[in-house]
């Protein structure tokens, strides 16, 4: 248990470091970043919208009859939250675009916190599973830091404030999510060591690869 804890903490900390590097790089080249913000935002929006509507939403609908309700509730909640930010934060500010930075920042913060929970789950299943998950997750941390910082700057926050908020929301929340969730995730995972569990995992990966390649 102790080994998996430190491994999960190390992986979540690595994710935070990669995010921080992204924030630092875009802060260092702020003029270039500001001039090309729309490209980063457009790319991220294209990926998120496509994955959501072409894969995540249909998959959720097929797995749970209540999925449409949850999707609707999530949309309405985000809409109301956005209205709240605009009404009680933006109207109190000299810059009406503050909500453009605050809402995505909070969303990314929640997303990064969930990333930390995923590290807890996967590493408690097995070190190998954790590394597989971490490899894919760490790769998206660099642009995540860039997007968070640029959205805040574009919304009118100062460079220093944007740097701090992006660091707290996109970087710190990942190891925080891991530390909070680790004691409560999969308490029996380390007490069950099936002889052929790794073979089953490899077979699953092989099947997935065959399916993906057959559609290419």
Image: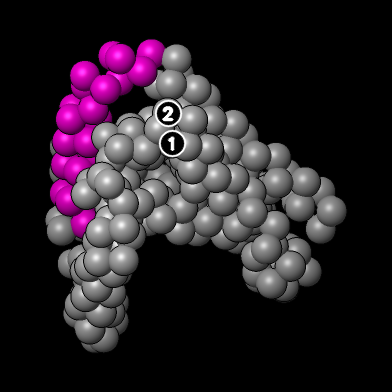
Location of residue 204 with respect to 44 vertically, above or below: below
Q: Residue at x 28, y 14 (%)?
A: 32
Image-quadrant location for residue 77: bottom left
Residue positioned most to the right = 2
| Mark 1–mark 2 CB contact (< 8 Å) | yes
Query: SS of the residue at dot 2?
Result: helix
Image: magenta residue range: 29-52
User: What residue is shown at x 33% (from left), y 33% (from top)?
Assistant: 153
Q: In this view, does 154 lie to the left or right of 114?
A: left
- Callout 1: SS: helix
| Residue toward you, 40 or 64 | 40
Residue 73, image x, y percentages: 25, 79
Relative image position of residue 102 (x, y in whole percent) = 35, 51
Which label is found at residue 159? 2
Which disc, if any, is residue 162? 1
Could you classify mark 1 by the number of other residues whose Cα lies within 10 Å: few (under 14), some (14-19), or many (20 or more)? Answer: many
Describe residue 77's horizontal placement relative to residue 144 as left or right.
left
- Can you see residue 177? yes
Which corner quadrant holds the N terminus?
A: bottom right
């Amino acid at each position: 248990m102790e080994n998996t804890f430190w491994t999960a903490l190390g992986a979540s900390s690595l994710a935070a470091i990669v995010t921080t590097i992204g924030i630092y790089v875009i802060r260092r080249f702020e003029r270039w970043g500001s001039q090309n913000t729309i490209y980063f935002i457009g790319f991220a929006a294209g990926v998120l919208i496509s994955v959501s509507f072409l894969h995540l939403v249909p998959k959720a609908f097929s797995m749970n009859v209540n999925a449409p309700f949850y999707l609707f509730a999530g949309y309405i909640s985000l809409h109301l939250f956005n209205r709240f930010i605009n009404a009680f934060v933006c109207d109190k500010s000299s810059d009406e675009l503050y909500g453009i930075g605050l809402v995505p920042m909070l969303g990314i913060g929640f997303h990064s916190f969930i990333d930390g929970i995923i590290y807890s789950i996967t590493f408690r299943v097995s070190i190998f599973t954790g590394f597989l998950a971490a490899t894919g997750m760490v790769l998206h941390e660099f642009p995540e830091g860039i997007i968070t910082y640029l959205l805040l700057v574009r919304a009118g926050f100062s460079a220093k404030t944007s740097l701090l908020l992006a660091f707290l929301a996109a970087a710190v929340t990942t190891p925080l999510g891991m530390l909070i969730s680790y004691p409560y995730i999969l308490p029996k995972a380390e007490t069950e060591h099936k002889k052929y569990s790794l073979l089953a995992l490899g077979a699953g990966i092989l099947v997935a690869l065959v399916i993906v390649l057959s559609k290419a």
